[in-house]
Image: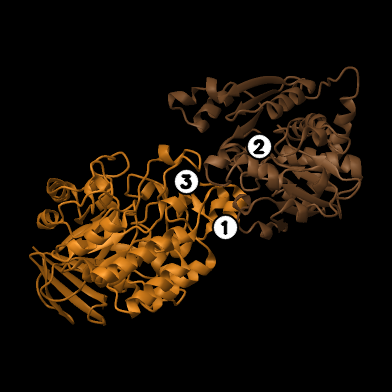
Chain colours: A brown, B orange
Amino acid sequence: MNFKRKDLLGIEDLSKEEILFILETTKSFREILERPIKKVPTLRGRTVVNLFFEVSTRTRMSFELAEKRLNADVLNFSATSSSLAKGETLLDTVKNILAMKVDCFVLRHPVPGTPHLLARELPVPIINAGDGAHEHPTQALLDIYTIQERKKRIEGLKVAIIGDITHSRVARSNIWGLSKLGAEVRVCGPPTLIPPLIEEMGVEIFYLPEDALREVDIVMMLRIQKERQDEGFLPSISEYIEFFSLTEDRLSLAREDVLVMHPGPVNRGVELPARIADGKRSVILDQVVNGVAVRMAVLYLLLAKR
Amino acid sequence: MSLLIKKGRILDPASHLDKVLDIFIEDGRIKRIAKDIDLTSQEVIDASGKVVIPGLIDMHTHLREPGREDEETIESGTCAAARGGFTTICCMPNTDPAIDDPSLVEFIYKQAENKGIVEVLPIAAISKDRKGKNLSPMGRLKAAGAVAFSDDGDWIANSSLMRRALEYLKSFNLVLISHCEDGNLSGNGVVNEGYFSTITGLKGIPREAEEVALFRDLALARMSGSSLHVAHVSTARSVKLIREAKQVGVKVTAEVTPHHFTLTEKEITSFDTNTKVNPPFRGGEDIEALKEGLIDAAIDVIATDHAPHTIEEKEKDYADAPFGIIGLETALGLVIKELVEKRILSLMEAIAKLTINPARILGIDRGRIKEGVKANITIFDLGKIWLVKEEELASKSRNSPFIGWKLPGKIEWTIVGGKVVYGV
């Protein structure tokens, strides 16, 4: 198959075949990461700009590592040191950087649709590294890769995504991706954090983890932001922990071979206790290493043949 | 000064006239309406094959002057109005400063007289500085020429103040126009709350933000016995609430915008900020209900809510860009395309909602073609399809989701007080 897209904006518009193709491509890059010398010349002479308008450690470092291991030149741009403070619009900033002859933008932005705005206006590939509560395609791809690696299949698996669904781009991208590949997805959280009509995305809704976790193969815990308490979504974080965190008792309702996932960064003791995060069912660190491989694959597919 | 309009199909909803006749205009007024008028006239318009209607009236326009003359001015806004067939437009008071003082009402009239090419009637603020705290001097504002009151853009959250405003207005017999939106429910939402807000991650504005506010306003209108006009109705349940209130005698009227009966929330998936409007585009079932409301007269008026914003403002991201789209130049075309051609309303019924109905609500002597009245007349070609081109818009702003659309009903001439202000 030929991957013909200019950009990677979301999982919603990818076909099952395209997702499988990216996962297949990821495999070869995952192998490279096990070599003593983890660098390949694939993107030598290409310049990738990481534009981050939100605080991020993991995703930014993961992209940067992926770019460096492909031998691309890397420019990092973060909101605090940006010229946007001087009244320049995002589009204008990006056009100015483009005028310096760069080859690709990786964008993280708090507002949904900003990568789409850039993709429409610019001739170079745009990779969405998270746009508000909309999508985070590379996260979903690395999550699906991690599941595939362990379970050898996606079709027929039961996956519970638990936490703040409303504000989660990770949840949305995973719902699209996992559903396309035939998994059965459940979402769970307090009703104030479940967005309206999400069932039309093809998921089942649960309001308590005890109900959502029964017989699941995968549990994905989402990060809960402390601000949700002040915004009136929750009475308190401590009450959230009491009813919605992952405990040993709750986890025992899942299948014996359940995998515990988290997109990070984990609030240890909030979404799940350290014991589970570091336990043998946890694949949280696998997700991190696979993230680099997935991003190498995406960069390769979008850039290498241009 | 005289003008003869020959052989046009005259459509006057107020008198149910629909006939090919001539109109003779002298000194700004309609002198005669008859077949084959044989009078010498300085100017003659051959309107054969065209439809001649009372000049359109928009009771919901944002002209942005004073304060945001980069978005629109009275001059450019009235040019857009003329191009859209509107001869009278009512400008909303959410300017900077807000129109909450007689001197500002006078300023609008003066600017309109000097720079405007169609009639501009100011709507004044209900509360001082539109802050929702103290009543504006409504009596004096009326004396200066305000035709209605509204804090448009902001709902009066204080129910007691809203009650007093409705009661106080009875002395002055003007309508209060409410922008129904419970700000706590809409929060910092930008699109309709539902499936499309969920998949895009854009923050939602639930239908209930409008309906809760509307319900309270209807209760207070009933309590006070005053006239309430509901701006830009957008949901199915709002239509139902208004219909039921009318049935029990509440003095309520309502308007819908062309964009709300044309586009659904699905548009937002493009993330194009020209789809960001308040109230937001709703669902298909809401559009059906709005159309039913237009049919059974739960909805009296079609108004544009023409809301100009600069390219620079709309170039921002979806959360940051301002709400609003321009509508004066596409209104009639959308009405014909979506309502008349789809047989929701007859052309006569549709034109009523753009002429005599708003005139009656505002209590102004406009919106009819009759001997003796001021000659505000619009002539259009019903069958002529035209392309909405960005570079041809007369408005200063370009924020329309209809650019590139083909619309029927090309405006050929717009006549204000017997004078052609727009003509091809």
Q: Quadrant of residue A139?
A: top right
Chain of the residue under the numbered disc 1 shown in the image: B
In space, the residues marked 1 and 3 are separated at their CA atoms by: 15 Å
One can see residue B8 in this view: yes
Q: How crowded is mark 3: few (under 14 residues within 10 Å), some or many (20 or more)?
A: few
Q: Name the residue under label 2.
A: A128
Q: What residue type is labelled 1?
A: Gly
Q: Position of residue B89 (x, y in %)?
A: 24, 58
A59 vs B276, left or right, is right
Of A206 and A57, which appears nearest the observer?
A206
In the shown orientation, is residue A237 left or right of residue B100? right
Q: How crowded is mark 1: few (under 14 residues within 10 Å), some or many (20 or more)?
A: many
Q: Distance between the residues labelled 2 and 1?
A: 24 Å
- Work out whether B244 lies above or below B67: below
- Give percent across and percent down for residue A49: 64, 25
Give the residue type at disc 2. Asn
The residue at which mark 1 appears reads as B194
In the rendered image, which residue does mark 3 sit on? B188
Instruction: Say whether mark 3 and mark 2 are on the same chain.
Output: no
Q: Which is nearer the eye, A94 or B55?
A: A94
- Quadrant location, the C terminus of chain A: top right
- The residue lying toward the viewer, choosing from A291 and B183, is B183
Q: What element carries label 2?
A: strand
B99 and B185: which is toward the camera: B185
- Which of the chains bears the disc numbered 2? A
Is the residue at mark 1 from the same chain as the one at mark 3?
yes
Helix, strand or loop for disc 3? loop
